[in-house]
Amino acid sequence: MTTVTHEHEHVDEHAAPPAPTGWRRLTAPGWLRVPWMIVVFFGIGAGITVLVRWLEGWHPIWKGSIITTVELTTVPLGFLAGIGTFDYWVRYATGAPTAPEDHSGHGARSWRDYFRVNTDHKVIGVQYLVTTIFFFLAAGMLAMFVRAELAKPGMQFFDNQTYNGLFSVHASLMIFLFVIPAFAGLANFVVPLMLGAPDMAFPRLNALSYWLLPMAGFMMLGSFLVPGGAFATGWTSYAPLAVHQPLGQVFFNMGVQWAGASSIMTALNFLVTIITMRAPGMTFWRMPLLVWANFTTSLLVVIATPFIAGSQFFVMFDRVMHTHFFDPGHGGYPLAYQHIFWFYSHPAVYIMMLPGFGIASEVISVMSRKPIFGYRLMALSLLAILVLGFSVWAHHMFVSGMAPWLRVPMMATTLLIAVPTGIKVFSWLATMWEGRINFSTPMLFAVGFVSMFVIGGLSGIYLGAVPIDIHVSDTAFVVAHIHYVLFGGSLFTIFAGIYYWFPKMTGRMYNERLGKLHFWLTFVGFNLTFFPMHLIGVQGMPRRVADYAPRFADWNLFISIASFGLGASTVVFLYNMIWSWRFGPPAGGNPWRALTLEWQVTSPPPIFNFDEIPQVVGSPYEYGVPGARHAVLNGDRAEVGELEEVRRT
Amino acid sequence: MAVHVEAHGPPLAHRSSRVDASILGIFLFIASEVMLFGAFFTAYFFVRVAAGTPWPTPPFHLPVFVAGVNTMILVTSSFTMHWALQSIKRDNHAGLQAGLLLTFLMGLTFLLTQILEYSRIGFAPKDGAFATVFYCLTGLHGAHVAVGLMLLGAATIRAFRGHYSSEAHHGVEIPGIYWHFVDVMWIVVYSTVYIL
Amino acid sequence: MINPLRSEAEAFRFVLATLAYFAAIVLAAVLGGRWVGLAVFIVLSALVIGWWVRARRAEQPVPTRPTRQSAAGERRILVIANETVGGEMLRDCIREKTEGYRGEVLVVTPALNSPLKHWASDEDEARAAAQKRLDASLARLREAGIQARGEVGDGEPLQAIEDALRTFGADEIIISTHPEGRSHWLERGVVTHARERFAVPITHVVVDLEAEREEVR
C-alpha cells in the first residue's frame, strides 16, 4: 500500500493530458473531428444502401429518399463519434488499456467546457437546459407563425401543407426537445446533489444522452429544408397518412427515435443512481419528492418509450421496404398504429408532468416554510399515476372507429386517474395553509401551476367522458386542454425550477422584479390566449386547420394578439437569465434556507459535489419542526460519525 | 488522525443497495428492449388476431425445422455462456476463453443461418402483412443478436488477453446477461411465430 | 422495489424457466389443440405470478455500528424509550454499563404513530406525545440520579436507532418497550431486528407501567 505524499513523479494528476497539436487535433475528440467523421459515416450509409440496391437490382440505385432515410441513422452516429461520446467504449471494446480516470475532463472551469463531451452531471444539466431553451424558442416562433396565419380567416401567409408543417414541428419540438429533456436537465443537475451522490451512476452514458439531443432537434427543424417541406402529419403522425407523405416525414420518424434513445438512457441512469447511490440514512421514504418524481418518471420512460420507437419503425419500414403493417388490403390493421403510438404517448404526458409535480412540491414546501402535507401519500400517488397511466391510452381514440366496447373502460380509468392527481393538488394547498408564504418568482410559478393545472385537469375530465369527447374531438377545445396542462402545467413548473435552482447553478441571484414581471406577463398572456379556445372549440372551431368559418374570426384575432404578447414575455425571461448569469449578485449557498442536500454546498457546487458524503437523519421537509434535521455534515467535528458494516465471521 | 486526501476525484459514493449498479443497469436496459419487442409483438397481434390474417399466409411456409435446429444452437450457446462465467468465477481462464469462443461461434452460426433462410424462404417483407411481421420480428431479434455478438466479441478479445479474474469479470457478466435475454426472446419469437 | 434478477446466474436460470414454460405451452397446444394450450398458458402464468409475489427476499441486513470510537474513559449509552422509562432497573442498568467511565446518556423517544396517520405523514400528535414521554423519562432518570439529554426520534424505532447512532455514536443501546401483547404495531420484533441490524450490545428492558413493574431481558 502506497502512502500518499505531496510529491508525485512529475505527473500532476490535476492537469489534463497535454492538448494535441498539429494534425492530431483532427483526430482528437471534439468539433474538429466532427466534420470529417460525418463525411465518413455519410459515405458508409450511402455506400451500404447503394450496394444493397445494386445487388438486389432495385432501380434507381441512387434513390435520394432511401439514401436520406439511411443517412438519418448514420450521420448522427458520425457526429457522436466525432465529438467523442464513444471514445472510451471503443477503446474498451478493442481491448486497449483504458486511460486511468484522471478526472481532468470532468467539470467546467471555463465556458469551453460546456461545448464538449463532459461527464459532470452539473455541466450536462446546464447543457440540457440551454439546448432545450433554444428549441423552446424555435418552437415558440413556429407557434407565432401559426397564430399569424390564424389571425384572420382565409389563407394569408402559408399554403395548407406548409401550415400543417408549422404546427407539427411546433408540437414535436416542444414535446421531444423541450419539455421532456428540460425536466431531464433540471433533474440531472439537482438529483445527484439531493441524493448526496458525487455524480450519476453512469456519467459517460449521461454525456451521450445529452449529445443525442441537438441532433434530434436539428433533424426535425431541418425537415423544412427538404423537398416536400416539413413533416405535416401532426406530432401524432398517424399511419397510413405518414406512409405516403414526402421525405420530410422521415425526419420526424428518425428524430423521435434519437430523442427517445436519449430519454431512455437518461432514465436508466436516474433509476440506477436513485436505487444505488443514496446518501447513508436516506431511505426511500426520506427522499425529496423531486427524486420520487424523477424515479417514477424514469420508470415510465423505460417501459413506455420503446412503443413509440416501434410505431415509428413500422412507418419507416412501410415507407422504405414497402411492408404492410397498416394496409388492410394486404392483411394489415390500420388502427394498430394508433394503439401502439398512444400506448407510449399517453404515459408521455405523465413523463411531461410528474417531474413538474416534484418541482412544485419542493418549491411550495420551502416557500411556505412548512412540511409537505401527506408526504407518503404524495409519493404513493406518484406510483398510482405511474400504474394507472398505462391503462388509459385509448381515450385518445374514442372517435377513431376502434372496438366500441373499449370506450367505457377507458373512460373509467381516465376519470380514475384524477384521484391521485387530486390528492396532490389538495396536498399542495394544505402545505400552503397557514404557512409563512414567500411569493418569490419560483413560488408564483408554482402556485400558478397549481391553478392552471386544475383548469387543464377539469377540461381533461370533460374530455374523458365519451359523449363530450365525441363532440369536441379535433376542435380547439382539445388545444385548450393540451396547453393548460402543458403550458400552465409543465412549462410553469419548468420556469419555477429554473428560477428556484438558478442561484445554485450559476452562483448568482436572478433579478426578482424582472422575474415577477415575467410571471405576470406570462400568466395573463397565457390565459387570454388559451381560455377562449375552450369556447370556440365547443362551438365547433376545428384544430389543425389554416382556414376556418368567419364566425370564429373575432375570437381568433383576439387569441392571436394575446399570443403575440405571450411570445413577447419570453424576452423578459431571456434577458433576466442572461444578464443575471453574467452580472447578478452572488447568491450564497442557501438563499432559500432550504433543507435538501443540494443547498448544503456552495453555489455553484464544488466539482465533485460533496467533500464528504452527508449523513441523513431525518425527512427533507421538517420546516418549523423544532430540533429536526435532514442531514448532518461532519466538517471537522469528530462528533458526528458514520455507520460501517461489520461482516460477522 | 488526519489523512491528507488528494481530492483528485469524488469521494466514493455510498452504496445504498446491495445490487451492483452496472448489473441493475443492464437489467433495466433489457426491460426497455423487452418493451420494444412488445411493440413488435403488438403489431403481430393486430395482424394475426385483429385483422385475422392466416398464419402462415398461403402459399408461404415457414422453415420450422431449420429454425428449430437454430433454436437448439442458441439455447446451447446460453449454456456455454453460463459455463464461461462459472469458469472465471473460479479463475479458470481456459474455461472462460473456450466458453466465450463457443458462444460467439454458435451465435454467429445462428445469425448466418437466419440470413440464409431469409434468402431461401421464398417471400420478401413486402409480400403481405404476414411476411412483414415475420421479417420484422425475426429481423429485430437478429439485430439484437448482432449487437450481442459485438459485445461477446469484445469480451472474447479481452478474455484472450487475460483481462478478467474471479474478482473482476463484469465485462463478461454483462454481455452474459444480455445474451441470455437474446435467448429468451428467441424462445418467445420462435414459439409464437413459427409454431403456434 | 423488488428486483428479481441480480446476476448472470439468475438470468441463466430464467432462460431455462422460459424454455420449460414455452415448451409446455407449445406441447399442450400441438397435442391437445389451442384451448388446451391456452389453459396451460393460464395455469403456468398464474403459478409464475404467484411464485414471484411470494419470493420476496427477506435479506439479512449486514450489521452496522458507528465508526466513531469513544475516547478512553468515556462511554455513551443510547436509550430508546418506546415507553416511559425510569426507575430502579434502568438506573442500575445504566450505572452498571458506565462503571468506571464518564457516562453520557441520550434518550430517544420514537414518535410512534397509528397506521393511518403514519401513511398520511400526520406526525404532529405523535411527536407531541413522544415529547411528553421524553420529558417524563428524563425527569424520572434525574430523580434516579442520572443526567441524560433527550430527542424525539423517527416514528419507526429501528430508524430512530440508526439516526441516533449516526449523530451520537453510542457504545451500547438499551431498548425499553411495552410488555408483549400491549406492544405498538411498530414495536413488534424491534429488539430482534435491532440485534440483527446493529453490531452494538443491546439490552432490552420491559416496562409495565400499569403493574409498575420492569424487567430486564
Image (cartoon, coloured by chain):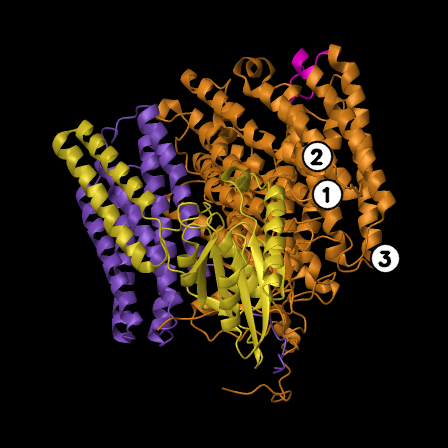
Amino acid on which the number 2 mark rests in the picture: Phe
Disc 2 + disc 3, Cβ < 8 Å? no
What span is colored magenta in the figure?
Answer: A536-550
Disc 2 + disc 1, Cβ < 8 Å? yes
Chain that bears disc 3: A
Amino acid on which the number 3 mark rests in the picture: Pro
* Distance from the alpha carbon under mark 2 to that under mark 1: 9 Å
Comes first in the chain, label 2 or label 3: 2
The residue singled out by tag 2 in the image is A449
Comes first in the chain, label 2 or label 1: 2
Determine the main secondary structure of the stretch shown in magenta: loop
Classify the position of the N terminus of chain B by image quarter: bottom right
Q: Which residue in the rendered view is the most extreme toward the left? A: C31
The residue singled out by tag 1 in the image is A496
Circle 3 packing at 10 Å, graded few (<14), some (14-19), many (20+), is: some
Q: Say if A541 sits above or below B118 in the image.
A: above
Q: Which of these two is toward me, C100 or A17? A: C100
- Asked if one can make out residue A230 in the rendered structure from this viewpoint, the answer is no
Q: Say if C209 sits above or below B135 in the image.
A: below
Percent position (x, y) of residue B18? 43, 60
Q: Say if A634 sits above or below A423 in the image.
A: below
The residue singled out by tag 3 in the image is A585
Classify the position of the C terminus of chain B by image quarter: top left
* Distance from the alpha carbon under mark 2 to that under mark 3: 28 Å
Amino acid on which the number 1 mark rests in the picture: Ala
